Image (cartoon, rainbow, N blue to C red):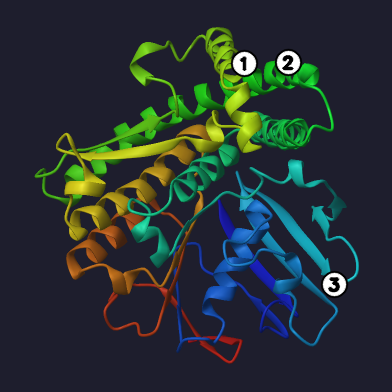
Amino acid sequence: MHVKKIFLADYRNYIEQTIAPSDGLNIFVGENAQGKTNLIESMEYAALGRSQRASKDVELIRWDQSSATVRIVFEKFDVEHSIAFELNRQKPRRLFFNDAPIKMRELIGKLNVVYFSPEDLFMIKGAPSNRRRFLDAEISQASPAYFADLLTYNKILAQRNSLLKKIREGSTRTTGLALWNEQLAGAAARIVVKRLEVVKKLSAIAGKIQSALSSAEESLSIHYAPKGLDEAKFDSGLTSTLAARYHNMLNNCADLDVARGSTSIGPHLDDLNFLIDGRELRLFGSQGQQRTAVLSLKLSELEFLNEETGTYPVLLLDDVMSELDSARRRRLIDFLRQKHIQTFITAVEIDALDCPAAVFDVDHAVIIER
């Protein structure tokens, strides 16, 4: 999978810009606040329909304009495709695949990307929501069925929480809760079974990468931590059995949930645990070990998506190289070149990278290839 062309019009600080990147390493060099991250963000947005840096689409439109366009042309299995977003301050966004309008649920998996930013280096010590967001984005790109289950679960969860608040306020009875408990339990089981399956795969891949990055001195493992459930005590293959357990737990915690006005059990509260040599990385790992573990996790994303989809995703590295020491930078570059992974790297200066690449200068949202 390779991005062939990027077109931006009135997106963030770009007036109008078209670039044709190489199929290998692409480095975008410039001072801060020139538009490097905005370029990286546009590809993540095209792939996932959202941005980590914007809560609303209108934030992506250049401040003095009413609309914006993002268009990404890419090649997948030797066939050229395009994804385009038309954003408008007054109207809902419009999404196109190969110039035909599509809905958001049809987007995921068309263009696969792995995004790595400096904030990800703190994933292990950060909030559980960050790790869930990472996992959901990863699985959704490989499995449209999972993305559909996730949308269904979140919709049911919102409806159950709304009912819980009404029951707490005394404006309705508890009789309607049983239906939502049953539906939520089924969706929760499907999500957790898939997450557990994927985490086991990621753990195996990341463990091998961590060993290579640390010269076989460290052993990394990743474990899924479902809230209220002991992973070792249920068979991940029996979705119906797990759904029954969730159903019982939702019934049992109904009074607590009414008092809180929210659902206290389910995959929306689950987490990931990282272990180095059997010890919890968050508590006992050094900063270097934690950063290497996150790097291993990101590289395992590449391998996982390649195994699941048959092609490597596009890698987006936003100002990450400056956060890694020279040895880790070199190992990362060698890995990417060996696997022929198209990579977009942003940097303030290029000297520390020292690798063959297409280099682009970014200055006041104008991109020029050297």
Label 3 – label 2 distance at C-alpha: 41 Å
Which residue occupies the foreground of this view, 213 or 157? 157
Residue 65, label in figure: none
Label 1 – label 2 distance at C-alpha: 8 Å
Q: Which residue is mark 3?
A: 89
Q: Earlier in the sequence, mark 3 or mark 1?
A: 3
Which residue occupies the foreground of this view, 131 or 332? 131
Which residue occupies the foreground of this view, 286 or 142? 286
Return the x and y of residue 108 as percentages of the image width and height.
67, 44
- Label 2, secondary structure: give it: helix
* Left or right relative to 146: residue 311: left
Q: Residue at position x 39%, y 31% from top?
A: 224
Q: Mark 1 touching mark 2, by CB under 8 A? A: yes
Q: Earlier in the sequence, mark 3 or mark 2?
A: 3
Above or below, 211 relative to 145 = below
Q: Which residue is mark 2?
A: 178
Label 3 – label 1 distance at C-alpha: 44 Å
The image quadrant of residue 256 is top right
Q: Earlier in the sequence, mark 1 or mark 2?
A: 2
Q: Which residue is mark 1?
A: 251
Return the x and y of residue 265 as percentages of the image width and height.
54, 28
